[in-house]
Amino acid sequence: MLVRYRPVFPLCSPLFLLVFLSSEFASVPARAAVPACDLASTGEFLNARLAFWQQRLNLQEWKLSVLASHPSELKPETLGNIHWDTPTKTAVVRVLSISDYKMACPAALDDMELTVIHELVHLTLSPLRSSTTNRADEEHTVNQIADALLKLDRQSRARRSTPVAAISH
């Protein structure tokens, strides 16, 4: 669920997680071109991004799926959620459907990808969850990590697509 709040996990530094996870970045293929915003191509986009981030977050042992969902299928004021079953290592990520966005296609796709990352970070941090975990603090921490991961990915892609001659002085 995407909601902005304060940080939680003092023993699990987001900086540590980013450094740890960045070691996986080099082996992951770059993001494909942005598809058209029809339901079929958006579904393909979401499945491709889910596979990309599943590998990047080292969640390959999980059977993950992503579903485009209407607001009635999500909690109010949220853009997605995740439900997982630890014993079977299965999880379903729900993301607000492209047809329910009120922004341009590229921005909506970017937001959908951020939602996928956000929900996978919840899954990654799930072993740290307890009955005393402050959900607002968890949301804030997950937002910070997901935002940072997406920014790192985009910066990395931008550097890879910049010609060497443009970089040298």
Image: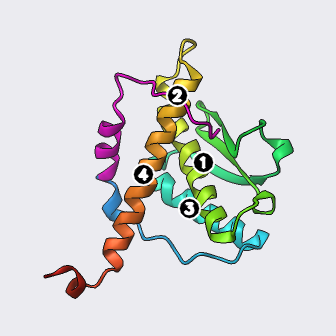
Instruction: Decide whether residue 70 is among the magenta residues.
Output: no
- Three-letter amino acid code at disc 1? Lys
Give neighbour class at mark 4: few <14, some 14-19, many 20+ (Cα, 10 Å).
many
Local packing at callout 1 (Cα closer than 10 Å; few below 14, some 14-19, many 20+) is few
Q: Position of residue 120 (x, y in %)?
A: 54, 44
| Residue in the foreground of this view, choosing between 69 and 66 | 69
Q: Assess whether mark 1 and mark 3 are in contact (beta carbons under 8 angstroms).
A: no
Q: Residues within 10 Å of mark 2 (few under 14, many from 20)?
A: many
Please give the residue where the numbered disc 4 appears in the rendered image: 149
Name the residue at 63% across, 62% down: 47
In front: label 1 or label 4? 4
Residue 86 at x, y = what percent? 58, 31
Label 1 and label 2: CA atoms lie apart by: 24 Å
Residue 124 against residue 102 in the figure, above or below:
above
The magenta segment = 1-22
21 falls in the magenta region: yes
Numbered marks: total: 4
The residue positioned 48% from the left and 26% from the top of the image is: 127
- Asked whether disc 4 touches disc 2, contact meaning CB atoms under 8 Å apart, the reply is no
Q: Earlier in the sequence, mark 4 or mark 2?
A: 2
> Which residue type carries mark 3?
Arg
Instruction: Report, in whole angstroms, how far the alpha carbon at label 4 lies from the one at label 2.
Output: 16 Å
Residue 138 disc label = 2
**Residue bearing the label numbered 3:** 49
Q: Which quarter of the rendering shows the N terminus?
A: top right
Q: Residue furthest left?
A: 169
Q: Earlier in the sequence, mark 1 or mark 4?
A: 1
Q: Name the residue beneath numbered marker 1.
A: 63
